[in-house]
Image: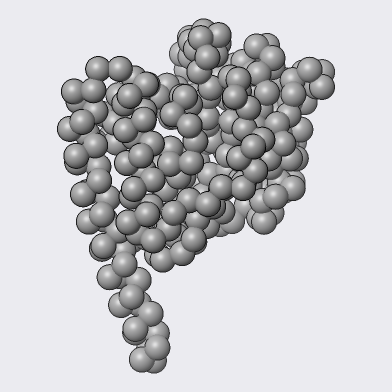
Amino acid sequence: MSITAILRAAKRITYGIYAWIALIAVVVPAVVVLAVMPTRRWRRFVTHWAAKIYFALIASPVGIQGARLLPDAPCVLIANHASYLDGMILTAALPPRFTFLIKQEMASLPFAGYLLKRIGSEFVNREDGRHRHRVARRLLKAAQSGDSLAFFPEGTFDEAPGLKRFQAGAFGAAWRARLPVVPVVISGSRAKMPADVWLPAPGPISIRVCEPVEPATQDSAAELLSASRRRLLEWLEEPDLARTSVGSSPPADDP
C-alpha cells in the first residue's frame, strides 16, 4: 500500500471516529431535552436544530436547492434512500411540521427509536395489511390538521447505486386526500456513509426539492406514484433499477 493510500485511510478513520463523537455529543443532550419537552412541535424544533448542528460540526452542512417549491400546505414528501444518514438529513433540511413514516423495526432501536417516537414519527408494519390501513387513517387525519408526511418509498437501501422499486406506501392516501407529492433528491449520502459502512467519510451533502406532482393531474394512485418517480429520476444521478424487474412498482393502495 502506498503512503498516499495509507494517509487517505487514516484521514477517513480519523474523520469517522470524530463524526461518531460529534453525534454522541449532539444526540445525548437532545434526548434529555426531548424527554422533558412538553409539546411535539417543540420536540421537532429541537430535533431539527440538533441535526443541523451535527452536520455543521462534521463540516457537511446540508445544502438545499429548490426550497421555494416546498408547499406551505400539507403535502407528502418522498426521497431516495441511500444511507443511514438520510433520515437525519431530511430532519435537518425540512421544516419541523413533517411526520416521518418509518418501518416498524426502527421503533426498537435504542436512542433512535425513543427519539423518533418523541417527535411523532409513524411506524408501519409493511407485512400487516390491517396495520397499514390504520396508519393510513391516522395520516389522513394528521394531514387535515396541517401535518405533512415524509417517507422513503424504496423502503430500504444497499451499497449498489440506483433507485429501487417503490412500495405503494402513502401514495394511495395522498391521492385520496388530494395531497401534492414532493419528490426530493438526496445527494452525497451514499458516498458519505453507504450500506454496511459504520465510519462516515468526508464529503458534501445536499438535497434538491423537485416540482410537486398534483394528484388532480393523475387518474389513480398508481399514476401518482409513477409520475412522482419519474420526476425524482430527472435529478437523481443514479440508474432506475426498476427497469430491470418485471413491472415498475406494486399497485398503490394503502400504506
> Where is residue 232, by image quadrant?
top right
Quarter placement of the N terminus? bottom left
Which quadrant of the figure contains the C terminus? top right
In the image, is 83 to the left or to the right of 252? left
Left or right: 25 as drawn, with respect to 94: left
Relative to the observer, which residue lies in front, 27 or 9?
27
Residue 184 is situated, as x and y percent measured from the top left of the image, at 61, 40
Task: Give me the residue at 76% from left, 33% from top.
Answer: 227
Relative to residue 190, is residue 99 depicted above or below? Answer: above
Q: Is residue 124 visible?
A: yes
Which residue is at 23% across, 23% downward? 37
Q: Measuring from the top left, give residue 171's x and y in whole percent.
A: 64, 23
Q: How is the image coloured?
A: one colour
Decide if residue 164 is on the left or right side of residue 43: right
What residue lies at 20% left-to-right and 25% top-to-bottom?
35
Residue 220, percent from left and from top: 77, 18
Whole-percent x and y of residue 9? 35, 77
